[in-house]
Amino acid sequence: MSFFPLFSAWFAVDILLATYAHGVHVDPNDIMKTIESECGDIIDCVDIYKQPSLQNALLRDHKTQLKPTKEPPKILHKLKGRNYSFPEQTWRRSGSCPEGTIPIRRKPTSADDEAAKRSLPFFSYAHPTDAAIKDEGKGKLEIAAAYGVYGPYHGASAALPIWKVQVEPNEFSKNYLLIASPHNRIFPPIIGLDPPDIKNQIAVGMAVYPSVLGDDNPRLYIYATNDGGEKSHCINHECGFIQTNNQFALGTMFRDSDSRVGGDLYFVTVALYRATGPAVWWLSINEVPIGYFDPNMFPVPFIESFHNEMGGRVLDTRPGGRHTLTPMGSGMYASAGANNAATIAYYLAVNKNGGDQVDDPVNTIVTTAKCYDVKNLGPDRDHPGTDVAYGGPGGYYCDQ
């Protein structure tokens, strides 16, 4: 079967889903319970077999995999003795979803659909060209990230920091762990060299993104695209992701988790990894596998990752024609060190057997070094994995 009819069919459905403007359609009859969180979030417990992704025509005959064929990478036991905290999500204080359902956060009333449509193309992780990032009245994507190209990999794991910062209207500030592979499958994978493209992408992170997520709190998100973000933009439950666990809700915040410069630091551990058998990519949060992307999400097969990336991104909408004041990470430069700058900790690649693979993300991308930077801090002296610091304050002087 040709991939192109499948590709066209997917985008037809993608257009249909896009009419919900970054929300998802849930039939009220499929809601088994509703939880009102103390932070204002409304969580609907939806029948696992009636979740939005399964309404896609391509998945009509899909048999939901309730558990992965391979357990996620283990992270937490490696971190004993480190003064880091891994908090629970706030909504869990107010209740829990019953077995056989998954939690889906309702679209916040404060979300701005028009601003979201303008900003979503900047959420893609394709490396920008000069033409792509220059100010064209829409904004500029600012990046400070490191990436490894010593694969092929079968995924990645890390601890992502939780930092609350103030963002300018209609902008976002986020961190992420990304795995990616090219559409061009006919290439010699040379260790240390970039693949020809990274159009198949899956990312997980924490974002302050009021236009979509509703407020200035850092919230958990996942993102995927099958064309480098040209037309396909899938955030959380919009398309392709099939959730199987009732403990974590996408788009929600973690309780009592405001990291402080030089003080307490809070993290969420994440992993994107391929299970055995077909190319099914699973997401785990704090070592709990919460769901997966069906292979039909990627008409050009996503079999391995040839590009593992981590760092921060900011959307600069050029308010008043000047560079944004939106910080990245903690607002401190990467040179401030792991206790002050935002740091993605304990990054490890996943090898083809599902085990840890020590990897050095030595390649970097920094769009405006005056504002934001990244620093590979190297292997953690006391724990497995590599630490990568990123961030910066933003500011008007960035244009100078």
Image (tube, grey):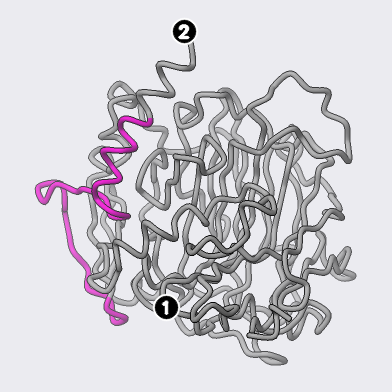
| First in sequence: mark 2 vs mark 1 | 2
Report the residue at 78% width, 66% height from top.
388
The amino acid type found where label 2 is placed reads: Met
Residue 256 forms part of the magenta stretch = no
For the C terminus, the quadrant is bottom right
Q: Which mark is residue 169?
A: 1
Q: Secondary structure at mark 1?
A: loop
Q: Position of residue 62 (x, y in %)?
A: 34, 25
Query: As displayed, is residue 122 above or below residue 244?
Result: below
> Which residue range is magenta in the image?
11-40
Left or right placement of residue 364 versus residue 319 in this view: right
Report the residue at 51% width, 48% height from top.
289
User: Mark 2, residues whose alpha carbon is within 10 Å: few (<14), some, or many (≥20)?
Assistant: few
Q: Label 2: which residue?
A: 1
Q: Disc 2 and disc 1: Cα gap in Å?
A: 46 Å
User: Mark 1, residues whose alpha carbon is within 10 Å: few (<14), some, or many (≥20)?
Assistant: some
Residue placed most toward the observer, 357 or 305: 305
